[in-house]
Amino acid sequence: MDAARTNAWTVLIYTSASRDLEKAVADSLEEITQQGGPPVDVRVVAQMGAQGSSQRYQLHGVSQPQALEPSRPGDMSDPEELRRFLLWGMEKYPSQQYAIVLGGHGAGFAGAVTDAQRRHMISLPELERALGELPQKPELVIFNTCLMAQAEVASQLQATGTTLVASQSELHGLGLPLAAWLQSLPDQPDGPAAAAQLIQAAARVPERAPAVASIDLRRWPELSQALDQLAGAILDSPESSPRLRRHISEQPELWPHPQDRPLVDQIDVAGLCARWSQDEALPALLRQQAGQVRTLVLNICRSSSPEAHGLSIYAPEKALGGPVKDIYAALSFARETRWDEAFNGLVKER
């Protein structure tokens, strides 16, 4: 074992650096070691992949990332590679509580952590299996990527941790301010408290992390049920489709790169439900269900941005088809709710 005693927290960072991210990912790890590094009761280790190889590093008690083993060939988009790293980290750095950070590129419901060439990524079902096989459930699952604060992600990972922290939009530069957040980590008793500190740290650097959110996964079933009931109300009101679509189209774009559609057609749930709940031309039951969803989002989620509310959801402009349809159909959210049926019904009404 690395330590004679169990530490307060161990943070396990699994981050893939495709060609466009290699410098930023390396700099983000180095930032953690600067100015004294993590506090004494926190252990931080990372596995970084770049150019088809990977290497493990120690980030605590050192002035710069210290390689723990030689670089070796490895595909960071292989879920088995992720599982092996997490099992190794938990065994070598035992802790009272764990936080897992997944870095690199993210694509919402399509998955996260690409290979070096950005040809593959770990799907949400694969992430769920890898995280679900750990000997101890982590308090925090953190995505240091874009676009993962999404209902579909929370649904898939609800049993793998206590709290999910991710971005509703883009991350820039070095991404999440992990170095600053780690300084407060020993004083945090659980995942929600630690997540609140990360949200506060992100709010201080909006140029890096403009819309970071925390989602209480323990309450996710409650919100999932409300979203399913809202979807049912939409399906029961086909005459309202034009008004519902109009409100969707008027929502701000969380991903300002239209060339990446349809994967990135995500909108802020609470913002949309606020408009639906206040539109008296819509059926009363639909407005009531939208208001309930909005209230739950505001109770379960926290955001670093006053313009966002902590949870996105997929709402494409066209009915799902091809590979995107297959990816979505494999998700827990598609099985547990009628949301995909509702938005497919809306767009088919055009």
Image (cartoon, rainbow, N blue to C red):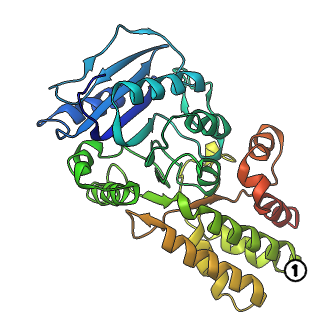
Image position, residue 182 (x, y; %): 25, 45
Q: How many marks?
A: 1
Quadrant of the drawing holding the C terminus = bottom right
Q: Quadrant of residue 228?
A: bottom right
Is residue 282 at all visible to an observer of this figure? no
Q: Is residue 8 visible?
A: yes
- Percent coordinates x, y for residue 52 in the rendering: 49, 13
Q: Nearer the viewer, residue 337 or 177?
A: 337
**Farthest residue toward the front?**
4
Which amino acid type is marked by label 1? Glu
Q: Position of residue 118 (x, y in %)?
A: 57, 26
Query: Vertical placement of 75 versus 282: above or below?
Result: above
Residue drawn at x 54%, y 40% is 106
Task: State which quarter of the image contains the N terminus.
Answer: top left
Q: Secondary structure at mark 1?
A: helix
285 left or right of 145 in image? right
Name the image quarter holding residue 43.
top left
In this picture, residue 89 sits left or right of residue 32: right
Mark 1 highlights which residue?
Answer: 239
User: Which residue is depicted at the point 48% across and 53% down?
Assistant: 162
Answer above or below: position of 212 versus 90: below
Percent across and percent down for residue 128 are 62, 40
Q: Nearer the viewer, residue 248 or 1?
A: 1
Q: Residue furthest left?
A: 35
Q: Residue at x 23, y 28 (%)?
A: 4
Report whether 64 appears left or right of 45. left
Position above or below: 346 against 19: below
- The 10 Å Cα crowd at callout 1, few under 14, some 14 to 19, many 20 or more, is some
